[in-house]
Every structure is written in structure tokens, then in C-alpha cells.
Amino acid sequence: MRRKLFSLFAVVMIAALVLGACAKPTEVPVVEPEAPVVEEPVVEEPVVEEPVVEEPAEVDPWADVVPAKEIVWWHQHTGAEREAAIEKIISDFNATNKYGITVIAEYAGGYGDIFNKMLPILNTPDVPDVVVGYQNQVATYQLADAMFDMNELMDHPVYGMSKEEQEDFFPAFFAQDVLSLFDNQRLGLAPNRSMEVLYYNMDWLKELGYDAPPTTPAEFKEMACAAAATPFSGATEGAASPTGYQLSIDTSRFASWTFAFGGDIFDYTANQFTLNSDAAVEAWTFIQGLFADGCARLVTEAYGDQTDFGNGTLLFTVGSSSGLPYYGNAVEADGTPFEWSVAAIPHTTPDPVMNIYGASVSIPKSTPERELAAWEFVKYYTSAPVNALWAKASGYFPVKASIADEVAAEFAGNKEAYATAISLLPYGVFEPPVPGYDFVRDNVIEVVMTSIVDDVTADVKALLDEANINANTILAEQLSQIQ
């Protein structure tokens, strides 16, 4: 039995081997080894620190400057009240400034006298430390780079003027001394301003049948001619014969009448004088007509129009608002006062056009010590409390808004006239602040004004054409000197 089982097992085993030998062998897939992943080495950029460049400390050129102990101010002010005010302003500054500066105020003549004295001494030690001057005069000085730019000290942390003090100036007055021809240098500060106004005798107008001053040139002529034919009942006995208008040969009169007829005497785009504009020709033909009709005459002596206005022989005159106290004094002088006031210059435009002007205080170049001392005085002189004192004494408009109401309320002269003048400030324009304007004023405009009224048959346009050529020739000569 066991042999049978063994035999059977053997057969099975042999069969299995045979079958295994005959079977197709199974292929084993070949697996290619994966390429090793080679990671790129991370190369770190070296951190390069930017070098810290320290800004150089700003050097203050005024840090070690000690203000001069004595400086000189050239001014043009006369008259008891103005002289007394100047004396007080100087005395108070000298006694209170912390640097021990002493200001010596010197009357140096009128504006033209000062201008002519300044020209030969520019950039020399002989210049005054503070000088009064119109913007065009200072522009002429600056052709020689002879004036100190106040921008250097305006915002200085120690010596500057605070933002509040700067903003207290009436904006137009504050901006007037920043001259674009010289890269917006500030060549002055305004201590006062005034305006050309029409002075009129209201009592005389009423006698002539009018209840208000003229607002147009046509009304002005009608009233002026009526006055020339009908004397004022309140006129001083033995005074001059009556007249409607007296003309001062003064460039500001030329500008004021041209403005009133809607024109200008300078084209700021073309940078040229326009003395022969249509408005100028119309205005000066009108003035010539007043002379031709016997309704106007020239002022023949200094302030003669104030005298004649006061004695009742002059109905109208055009002059500075700063003359208000003097006109008031002239009216009171005879003991027969009359009602009078001021108004806008009669105009062809919808609104008045008023000529506002005023000299500023400027600092000629000298030494840092003198310039700093001068700046300290200019700051004081234009400060609000001092400006109030000066405006009340001088009759000029104040330049600081904070004291305008105070000045108006306490004005010593004709309060109604002063209030009227103040109300006309929004209509103000300015004469050109260009180099050489003084030469144009003296040698061109005042000459042509005289020619127009001396010969009432003269061709106004031809005269103004020639004057304009001469004015622009002078201007070109001046502008050619700007570096």
C-alpha cells in the first residue's frame, strides 16, 4: 500500500516538473533606475547694505552775525504830525530792541531826490541801511544787484516774521514788493499805501444843482464847466477865479485817468509800455477838451490845488488819499468850512478802477551786520501796533488787516471821506513796477502831459505814439542790464 502511494506521489511530481518545463517563462519587467534629482545649490546673494549718507547739516549763514549797533534810514516824510510819529517810532525802537540797535532817521528829500542820490552810491559803504522807494525805483537799483532779498530772513527761525504776522498784511500790499523780473525776490515791505481819489466840494455842487459827485467823465465835464462859470458862495474873498478842475503834471494822474477810461499804461504780457492805447488817447483827448473849454487849468505851485480847494475856488481835484488831513486843514483854514468828501475818479467802466500806490522800505546791500540790523527795524516798523500809530498820524492806509478798523474809527480827519476811500480799495490796480519807470515818468510822460494841455489843438494820438516809442526805448535799455 505504501508503495502504491509513493508511486502515485512520484508520478504527480514528475508530471509537475514536465508541465513546468513546457510552460512559457514569465518576463520580469526591467525597471530603469530613476535619474537622481540633483538640486541646484541655492546661492544666496550677499546682502549689501546701502551706505548711510548723512545729509550735511544746513549751515545758517546768520548764526554768527551780530546786528550792527547803528544804522541810517533815508525817508521823505515832512509835516508836523508825520515827523512827530517818526520820532516816536524811532525812539521806541531804539529803547526797546534787544540788540541795542540805534536807528538814525534822515530826511533825504522827495522820492525823486532819494532816487537820484541812491544811483551813484549803490554797492558802496555809503548807502543808507534802510531806504524808502517805489517798486520801480528799487527794481532799477536791482539792475546792479544792489538790494538785499528779504526772503533770506522772512522765515528765519530766529529773526523771521511769523506766519500770522505775514498773513496779517493785506495780500495785494504784501505781494507788491515781490518782483518777478528778479526771480521773485522780496525787495521791500509796505508800511503804508494810498490811492488816487477825486476830491469834491459838496456845498458848491448843491449850489450848481447837483446832489452827488460825478460818476462818469461826461458828468464830470458838465459839473466842472458849470463851476468855472459860477463862483462858489463860500469862496474866500479875493481868492483866485473859479475853476472846475486843476491838473497836476504827475504820472500818477496820467495813469489814473487812463485806468478810469478802461485802459492801462503797460502790457504785462508783451512787457511793453502802452501809453498810446485807445483808452489813453480817449482819456487825454477828454482832458485836453476840458482845457480847451476853459473848465480846467494846471496846478502851478506845490499843493496849490489843496490851497484853492480850501479857499473855495476849485470844485474838483484828483490826488492821493494820504492828502485827506491836508485837504481838511485847508478847508478849515479860512474859518468858513464847507462840506467836502472824496469819490472814485469818474470812469467809463462798469466799476471804478483806482490807482493804488505806495513806497516801501527796502534794504540796500552792505554787510550782513548792517542788513540784519536793518531787517530788525523794518520788521518793527511794519508790525501791527506801529502800523496803527503811523497810519493815524500820516493819513495813509494801514497795511495790516488786524488794525484797519481801529485806524478807521480813530482817523483824525474827515471820517466819512476816509471810510469812502477805504471802501474803494477792492477796485485797486497798480502802476508798472519795472526798471526805468522813473526815467519814463520824468522824461516822457510828464513831458507829453504838458504838451497835450499847453496846446489844445495838438494831436493827442501823435503825441502819445511818440511818447510810447521813447518809453519803450528806455525800458529796453534798462531790461538789457538784467543778468
Image (tube, helix red, strand yellow):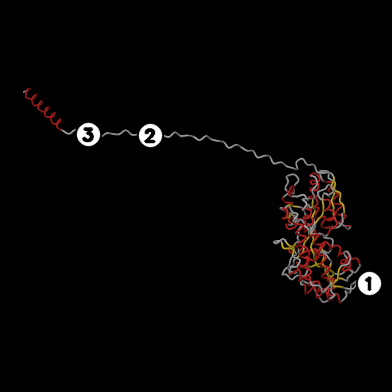
| SS at mark 2 in the image | loop
For disc 1, the marked residue is 238
Say the numbered circle drawn on residue 37.
2
Distance in Å between CA atoms under marks 1 and 3 = 152 Å
Q: Does 16 appear above or below 213?
A: above
Residue 68 appearing in the image: yes
Which dot, 1 or 3, sits closer to the camera?
A: 3
Q: Indicate the amino acid at tag 1.
A: Gly
- Residue 357: horizontal and vertical position, in percent? 78, 60
- Give whichever of discs 2 and 3 has the lower sequence position: 3
Distance in Å between CA atoms under marks 2 and 3 = 29 Å
Please identify the quadrant where the N terminus is shown: top left
Q: Does 446 appear above or below 377?
A: below
Q: Indicate the amino acid at tag 3.
A: Glu
Q: Are marks 2 and 1 in contact (CB under 8 Å)?
A: no
| SS at mark 3 in the image | loop
Residue 401 appearing in the image: no
| SS at mark 1 in the image | loop
Number of on-image labels: 3
- Residue 264: horizontal and vertical position, in percent? 74, 65
For disc 3, the marked residue is 27
